[in-house]
Image (spheres, helix red, strand yellow):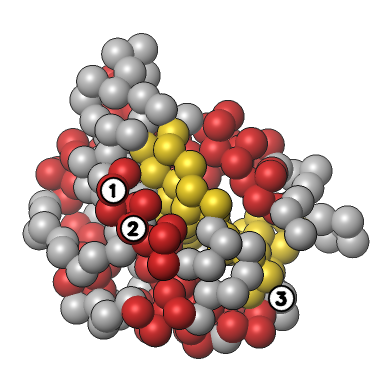
Amino acid sequence: MDRSTVPLMLLPAMGCDGQLWARQIMDLADLAHPEFGDLTQDDTLAAMAARVLAEAPPRFAVAGVSLGGYVAMEMVRQAPERVDRIALFGVRASMEIRARTVAGQGLLATAPHADPRLSAIVSGRAQAMAERVGAQVFERQQRALLERPDISDAVGAIHVPTLVAVGDRDRICTPDDARALGDRIPGARFHIIRACGHLSPLERPGEVTMLLRDWLEQH
């Protein structure tokens, strides 16, 4: 790894795999050394966070979408001295969660009319990820979210440069949900991604890359 690059752990949303971050892995190669965290083996956020921490560099930046964002916050709670900065996409401040099937998650992942030019392509790729991940992993991940503890301790542990971003047409985490989270983290930068649903790295890869660049260069 080039000494000038930043170790960056990328964590997926529920029912997603590494394709969610494919563009950022390529587009940030000059600035970061991205690694993809495995959230498929465990059924609690704490165990997921511990697994990723065991594989992560001694100190790193972490970015997560939805489930990945909750795991990222739990990583900060477990090992605050190791996390240099955190980026949260489509993460709620509240505990409410709606039970969904794998097929339903794939359909709900992107707003069908967020952008007519992209919706068919993105929805198909989201469904393909859900099918590759499979029902058993999806059920474990859903159980982890349904049984997640109050996130207040995890939020309170965040004292590093923080980005909170959300799609303006996200139906899983609304902009108000995400803004409420950003308001709880001192100094957090909040950004609304226009014409975007829940899976912003896939739907608006260029904008997400620019957000992550600014975040990675933030002092």
- The image's mark for residue 176 is 1
Residue at which label 2 appears: 180
Which residue lies at the image location 59% right of the left edge and 83% below the top edge? Answer: 80
Q: Nearer the viewer, mark 1 or mark 3?
A: 1
Q: Give the Cα distance between marks 1 and 3.
A: 31 Å
| Coordinates of residue 71 in the picture (x, y in percent) | 42, 71
Q: Nearer the viewer, residue 47 or 180?
A: 180
Disc on the earlier residue, 2 or 3: 3
**Callout 3 amino acid:** Arg
Which residue lies at the image location 27% right of the left edge and 80% below the top edge? Answer: 150
**Callout 1 amino acid:** Asp
Residue at which label 3 appears: 59
> Do residues under tags 1 and 3 come within 8 Å of each other at their CB atoms?
no
Residue 29 placement, left or right of 75: right
| Coordinates of residue 59 in the picture (x, y in percent) | 71, 75
Q: Residues within 10 Å of mark 3 (few under 14, many from 20)?
A: some
